[in-house]
Amino acid sequence: MPRPTATLADWLARYETVTSQGIELGLERVGDVFARLDTKRPGHVLTVAGTNGKGSSVAMLAALLRDAGYRVGAYTSPHLRRYNERIAVDGRPASDDEIVRAFERIEAARGDTRLTYFEVGTLAAVVVFADREVDVAVLEVGLGGRLDAVNVVEPDVSLITSIALDHQEWLGDTREAIAAEKAGIMRSGKPAVYAEIDRPAGIDAAATEIGARLYAAGRDYGWQTDEQGGWSYTGMAVQLDDLAAPALSGEFQRANAAGVLCTLEAAGFGEILSPERINRMLTSIEVPGRSQRFSDRHRWLFDVAHNPAAAEGLAATLESAPPQRRVAIVGMLDDKDTSAVIEPLLPFIDDWIAVSASNPRAVPAAELGRRVALLCNGPCLIADSAAHAVAEARRRSSEGSEIVVFGSFYTVGPVQDALGL
């Protein structure tokens, strides 16, 4: 255990060394420690799972509830720049001291039980939210759902944003298999929302088996987009018109937003939903690393897209923008389908730069560059650091062009650090 005056950096360095950095799905170990912590449960718990759209949905849920006067805790992972981003209360990351105190309590309760890095972080969020007496906790599932550490916390409503192929070695190699894992966050007698129109049959089957009350996009609620880009929402008990497009780019963000509104309805927060509040909050929201834009002498677009479905969404965003020259900085982890992520973006990228993502599981820049060059049938520069990639992207960019950074949290974060954001 770190010395009594240990900093957050000390604790994180220890956990990176002595806990498992890998994936160990299962609830028995983390559930035992969670029970020993005996923390006070928030009045409402909303759990969010899905392949893509989780972070955006958590941010929208938290923003709408916060604007309505609730104290909201939001847990997300991984982080882009600082570990503290994972645990936020009322939109502000938890302090180093708060997280250290949570780690100290977890260490005292853990005994000889082995926990993974993610499990420790999940329990730390639970402790911080209890200490801060949040009214609502919004928890993002890290991987899958059924056996993810977040699933030790009993939800009032479960939201599944979408299902696509990702983490197949852990969740299965079909949408139906992945659906069964993600449906594990549903609870008997509790509402569950599925936010994608294309719903795997396994979702309905799981809801029936579990006894959850399923609210499905396109069946129990829906949305329509008008010619001006606005939209409307038809819920179980509310009709909301004259809604402005969310600030988060991509047509799929309306599906995410509609899923969020249905989740709030199902959780008993329907009275807080008004076009004024929705337009005020969702048109100003920004989620770091998700279609995030920045301008200095150049124009930058950051997106953590790291699976085929997310890459398709990024490609749609690029296609909807005016034609322009683009330079891409890409870094990916080795368990991702490189070809399926790169191929949708080939028509929109003119110049490629490969960099090693800041993670032991990264594809080395030279190997990633070789794969990209084969796919685009052209050159791909190999950068030896995020700073080198930034310098080269700037050198290769002319006025009116755009630099796109994508492929992983562990790529976007270091590039933003190199930019001094």
Image (cartoon, rainbow, N blue to C red):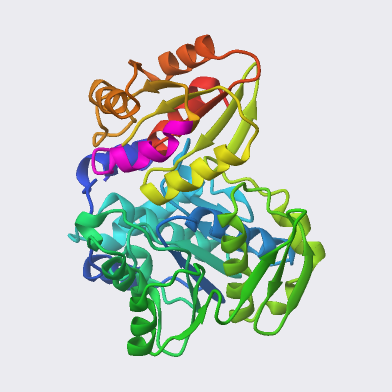
Does the stretch in magenta take in 345? yes
Q: Is residue 241 shown above or below 4?
A: below
Residue at x 35% of width, y 23% of height = 354
In the image, residue 288 above or below residue 43: above
Q: Can residue 96 be seen in this view?
A: no
Residue 14 picture location, percent across and down = 27, 40
Q: Quadrant of residue 342?
A: top left
Say which residue appears at 42% left-offset and 32% top-offset.
346
| Residue drawn 74% across the image and 72% down it | 273
Q: Mainly helix, strand or loop, the magenta region?
A: helix
Q: Which residue is drawn at 30% across and 73% down?
A: 180
Taking the image as drawn, is residue 208 in sight?
A: yes
Please give left or right for residue 417 compared with residue 263 in the image.
left
Q: Where is residue 397 in the image (x, y as percent from the top left)?
A: 55, 14
Outermost residue, top direction? 395
Above or below, 140 against 160 in this view is above
- The image quadrant where one finds the C terminus is top right
Please, is residue 315 above or below residue 276 in the view? above
Q: Give, as a single range, the part of the protein colored magenta.
A: 333-347
Tell me residue 251's x, y (percent): 60, 54
What is the x, y in percent for residue 176?
29, 70
Numbered-mark total: 0
Left or right: 112 as drawn, with respect to 329: left
The part of the image, by quadrant, that contains residue 146 is: bottom left
Q: Does the magenta stretch include residue 271?
A: no
409 sits left or right of 296 in the view: left
Q: Which of 4 and 413 is in front in this view?
A: 413
